[in-house]
Amino acid sequence: MGPVRLGMLLFILAAYGAWVGTSKEDDDTERLPGKCEVCKLLSLELQEELSRTGRSREVLELGQVLDTGKRKRHVPYSVSETRLEEALENLCERILDYSVHAERKGSLRYAKGQSQTMATLKGLVQKGVKVDLGIPLELWDEPSVEVTFLKKQCETMLEEFEDVVGDWYFHHQEQPLQHFLCEGHVLPAAETACLQETWTGKEKITDGQEKTEEEEEQDEEEEQDQEEEEGMTNTPGHPKRDPEDL
C-alpha cells in the first residue's frame, strides 16, 4: 500500500463527520442546510424535470362531452397543469439522491454523485486501512443527516409556496424559477448569497481553507514522487545509495 499522509487522512475523517452527524445539538444545528440551500435545490430539481418534458408534442383532452354537444378542450401537454403536477410528484424524494461533499464550500457541498471524501474513504478500506465512522460499512451510502433534513425542508417549502410555483409555471416562466421563487418570495435579500455559488471544480476546502486545483495537482505529484522513490529503494538489485557516493 502506498503511503497515506496522516494530515490528509485526519482531514478526511474530520470532514466526513458531517455525514454521520454527532450527538452535540449545537454542532448539528451549524451543519444543517438553511432555506437558501433548500430553495436552490428545489428550484434546480423542478426546472430540470420540466426541461426534460418540455419538448413533448402530446395533446391532452380535458373536460367531458356534455348534452349540449360541447367538445373537450385540447391542451398541449407542454403548458398543461398535468405536466406541472407530474413534475412536482416525488420532487423532494429526489433530494435523497444528493450527497454531502464535505470537501466543498457553502451550498456546493450538496451535489449528486459520490463525494471525493467518500471515494477516498472507500479506497482506504479497499487498501486494508481500518476506517471507523461509527456505522457499518453497508450504511455508508445511505442518505446523511443533512440530506434527510434537506428532503424534509423541501417538502415543507413546497407545501407553503405551492401557489407561487403554480403562478410561475403559468405566468412567469420567462424568469428562472430560482429568481422568481427564492429571491422573490422565500428569502430576504440578505440571505440569497448561496444562489450565486456555482461549482467550477477549481476550489475545495481543506483544513478550513480554500485549495486550488493547481495545489491539489502539486500534492498528487509529490505523492507519486514519494511512491516512486520508495519503490526504487525496495527494488531487488537496486540497493539504496547515499547521494555522496554517486
Image (cartoon, grey):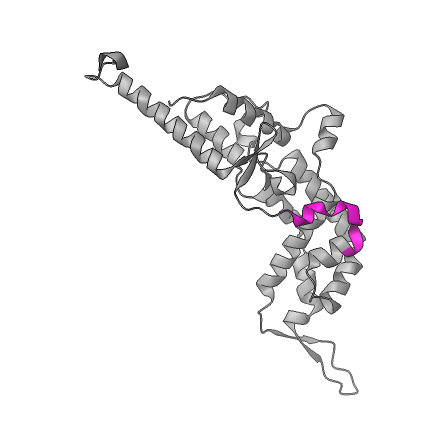
Q: Residue at x 51, y 36 (%)?
A: 116
Query: Is 175 placed above or below 35 here?
Result: below
Q: Is residue 220 magenta?
A: no
Residue sitting nearer the eye, 154 or 185? 185
Q: Is residue 7 left or right of residue 109?
A: left
Query: Is 236 placed above or below 167 here?
Result: above
Q: Residue at x 48, y 31 (%)?
A: 120
Quarter residue 72 falls in: bottom right
Q: Is residue 30 visible?
A: yes
Residue sitting nearer the eye, 60 or 244? 244
Q: Is residue 242 visible?
A: no
Q: Is residue 178 left or right of residue 111?
A: right
Q: Is residue 132 left or right of residue 170?
A: left
Q: How many marks?
A: 0
Residue sitting nearer the eye, 129 or 94? 129
Look at the image and tell me in which quarter the N terminus lies: top left
Q: Residue at x 48, y 34 (%)?
A: 215
Q: Position of residue 57 (x, y in %)?
A: 58, 74
Look at the image and tell me in which quarter the C terminus lies: top left
Q: Is residue 194 magenta?
A: yes
Magenta stretch: dominant secondary structure: helix
Q: Residue at x 28, y 17 (%)?
A: 233
| Magenta span | 184-197
Q: Position of residue 50 (x, y in %)?
A: 63, 62
Q: Position of residue 242 (x, y in %)?
A: 27, 12
Q: Position of residue 164 (x, y in %)?
A: 78, 59
Quarter residue 178 falls in: bottom right
Toward the left, the furthest residue is 237
